[in-house]
Amino acid sequence: MLGWIASKIYEALFTDIESDAKKTHILAKISFTIMVLVCVGLGFHQSLLALALMIVLMELSGLASAIIPSLIVSSIPALWFGVSNAILLYYNGVIDYYIVLGVFVRTLTASMVILLFIAMLNPYELSRIVYKLGARKSSLIPVMVWRLMPLALRDVVEAYGIQKLKKQSLWKSIAISTASMLEKSDFILESNGLKLEAGLVEPLPYKYSWKHTITYIAAALILVVFSLFY
């Protein structure tokens, strides 16, 4: 189960790593994420609209292959909160399926938009932001972290699969994948030590996709209008 979940997280975050949608301006991504979370706070119907709009947006952005993995990963906390809420209602003598469904949908929407925001982050854009904030020597760190994260998740999946075939305990696969991840991180730091010490002379070249930026802004505005008038 752990390996399967790790593989779904990998698919949700790193499947479409070269998508132009990741070149959406970060302020547009933040605006859309905030509006989805506002809809989650407002209620069930607003959350349902935000969820539907998010799925359509992922389809239009070329992130269709990440929709199902994102829904699966997001449904884990959603099921947890939904079942917990159902148990509390049962012990209080009240069984309201609408409330339980509302908790599930709202948690699912919130979890999925957070996953989408992480998946949409572009290491080169983050590097430019860090550089412009004055941390020239740290501007390469986002790129290195993004190189390490998919490798770490892949190691978890592979180590778990190997230990499962050997019929050994779970903690051994976790220990092996952790050791492999630390070894890779040390290798990356050692091979890029001089670059980190010297820092970038100028920010990494980066070009925004204004088509996707406008699309995300339009989606955020739709949620604003719906939140105000629904």
Image (cartoon, rainbow, N blue to C red):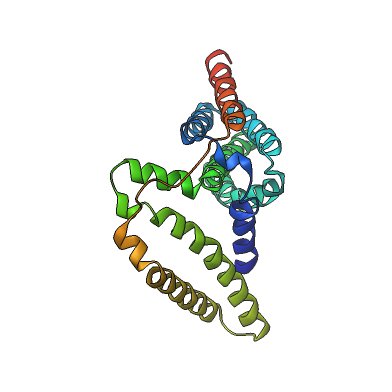
Q: Is residue 91 visible?
A: no
**Residue 95, image x and y in percent?**
61, 39
Locate residue 50: give its quadrant: top right
**Residue 85, image x and y in percent?**
54, 44
Left or right: where 37 falls relative to 218 = left
Comparing 218 with 228, the one in front is 218
Comparing 218 with 125, the one in front is 125
Q: Is residue 177 above or below residue 130?
A: below
**Residue 102, image x and y in percent?**
60, 35
Residue at far top of view: 229
Q: Is residue 28 above or below residue 198?
A: above
Q: Is residue 226 visible?
A: yes
**Tally of numbered discs:** 0
Residue at (63, 62) in percent of width and height:
7
Residue at (59, 85) in percent of width and height:
168
Q: Is residue 136 above or below residue 102?
A: below
Image quadrant containing the C terminus = top right
Residue at (40, 45) in percent of width and height:
203
Locate residue 186: give its quadrant: bottom left
**Residue 229, image x and y in percent?**
56, 13
Image quadrant containing the N terminus = bottom right
